[in-house]
Image: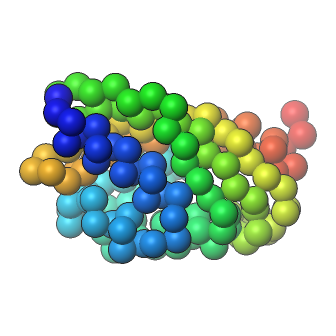
Amino acid sequence: MTDQHRELIQEWADSWSTPDKARFLAIFSEATVYEDKAAGQIMRGRHELGNFFDLIRKALPDFKVISDLISLGEPGGTIQWHMTGTHEGELFGHGPSHKTINVDGCCVIRIEGGEIVKSTDYYDMKTLYRQLGFDRN
């Protein structure tokens, strides 16, 4: 539980909030595993994670992840966040709705050697789809 871990977890949110893919990927190990539970996707390694980053940035060009709370533990931590953005490109098989999102979630992050080796995102896909007009229930 170090300030370095807190800074790395904050950088996770900050770098998601920029179009700078190199900045984002720099905090992950080469063999990182990134799991998006709501989307049902697992990215293995920086290459696959970079493709996922591109998909999100194309779908939501103004995508932001805002840190609400960081909790540290061994060997990493958890960040509670909310994501915002405007849907301008294809996202998980759905064309642009031009609607905005504001969805709460959290990510459990494992850190080894100053890099993120595993992160697992949790959020409610139904809320996301409802905000985009894909789910009217």
In percent of width and height, residue 109 lies at: 31, 40
Residue drawn at the location 48% of the way across and 57% of the way down: 16
> In which quadrant will I find the C terminus?
top right
Q: Residue at 66% of width from left, 63% of height from top?
A: 62
Give the camera-side residue of 35 and 18.
18
Whether 68 is drawn above or below 66: the answer is above
Give the quarter of the image for residue 74: top left
Identify the coloring. Answer: rainbow
Q: How many marks?
A: 0
Visible in this render: residue 29? Answer: yes
Task: Give coordinates of residue 53: x percent, y percent.
Answer: 49, 66
In the image: residue 115, left or right of residue 109? left
Q: Position of residue 57 (x, y in %)?
A: 59, 68
| Residue 36 picture location, percent across and down | 48, 48
Residue at (59% x, 53% y) in the render: 64
Residue 48 in view (yes/no): no
Up/down of 54 relative to 134, above or below = below
Q: Picture quarter containing residue 105?
A: top right
* In front of the other: 124 or 61: 61
- In the figure, 46 relative to 41: above or below? below
Residue farthest along the left direction in this orientation: 113
**Residue 2 falls in image quadrant:** top left
Residue at 23% from the left image edge and 25% from the top image edge: 73
- Quadrant of the image for the N terminus? top left
